[in-house]
Image (spheres, rainbow, N blue to C red):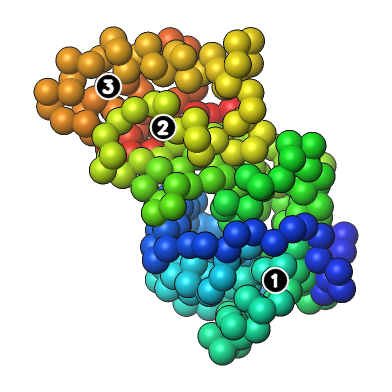
Amino acid sequence: MPARNIVSKKPIGLPTRGKTATNRLRRVDNFILLYEPSLLTRTDGLFQRSLFVDLGYGFDARTTLESAARFRLVNPNLPILGVEIDKDRVDAALPHADGITHFRLGGFNLPLQPAESVRLIRAFNVLRQYEEKDFAPAYEQIAQYVLPGGLMIEGTSNPFGSLWVANLARKKENGWIFEALVFSTNFRTGFDITDFQAVLPKNHIHHVIQGEPIYDFIEAWKRSAAETSPAKVFGTKQWFVAAAENLAAKGYKIDTHKKWLTKGWLIWNK
């Protein structure tokens, strides 16, 4: 069980810009629903009362409420917590609270009640504003609240959510294991691999330089896209699939199942 599940008196972290858009994180939620729906429906042991946490939901409650509507299609009783470090944002969200939907003041030290724990946490467009040195401490702080087997999806999206990149981190007994790096596009802006560089998570965005794994990955993906460019005549989606399959053939652990690639999700397994 997490070591400290208490309501935070002094939130750890900094306020985000808070701006968002309707359905900005819809593709993030839809990814989770396809990737591991059982995480949302588990009722064994401590999962019986564990929460989905939307960390840093922004200037209004819309992302938390949108997620509640989606996730409760598979688990109508799923408890959900929206966390913000800005008191005014929390106060504005409170009219939307009910018995299983909560909004609380907090930061990386999550404001949980004593009997609560976390099964899934989403932190989008939060760590991008921090220094890279703050990345690992933030993850370590959050880890203590998440149940073993739980998941964090943490990353950055563009303003409308049409393009994003996220870490998938799995909680183990001794901390986080980075399970995958997920690249997402809805194809509306075409397919240009360099576009993903602007929304890389904090632990990668400053490492797109020679000698770094993320640099090698992106360069290999660019080569794969060039090598499969004739597929463009069949459409952007087909080109994206062909480039991913080519990248996998180069030795990268890419999930080549069509259910991911045809929907614009490239999963680089770690």
Task: Write the residue at 71% across / 77% down.
Answer: 87
Percent coordinates x, y for residue 261 in the rendering: 32, 35
Q: Which residue has dot 2 on it? A: 195
Indicate which disc residue 86 carries.
Answer: 1
**Which of the two discs, 1 and 3, labels the residue nearer the N terminus?**
1
Q: Which residue is outermost to the front?
A: 17
Task: Write the residue at 57% across / 51% down.
Answer: 125
Q: Looking at the picture, which amino acid does disc 1 mark?
A: Asp
Task: Write the residue at 49% across / 67% down.
Answer: 63
**Which of the two discs, 3 and 2, labels the residue nearer the N terminus?**
2
Mark 1 or mark 3, which is nearer to you? 1
Q: Looking at the picture, which amino acid does disc 3 mark?
A: Ala
Point out the image quarter for the C terminus.
Answer: top right
Q: Secondary structure at mark 2?
A: helix
- Residue 263 quadrant: top left
Percent coordinates x, y for residue 226 in the rendering: 30, 13
| Marks 3/2: CA–CA distance | 18 Å
Indicate which disc residue 242 carries.
Answer: 3
Q: Secondary structure at mark 1?
A: loop
Task: Write the residue at 44% across / 13% down.
Answer: 220
Label 3 crowd bin: few (<14), some (14–19), many (20+), radius 10 Å = many
Q: Secondary structure at mark 3?
A: helix
Q: Is residue 14 above or below residue 219?
A: below
- Residue 39 quadrant: bottom right
Q: Looking at the picture, which amino acid does disc 2 mark?
A: Asp
| Marks 2/1: CA–CA distance | 31 Å
Percent coordinates x, y for residue 135 in the rendering: 74, 41
Label 1 crowd bin: few (<14), some (14–19), many (20+), radius 10 Å = many
Q: Quick one: 38 or 264, which is closer to the camera? A: 264
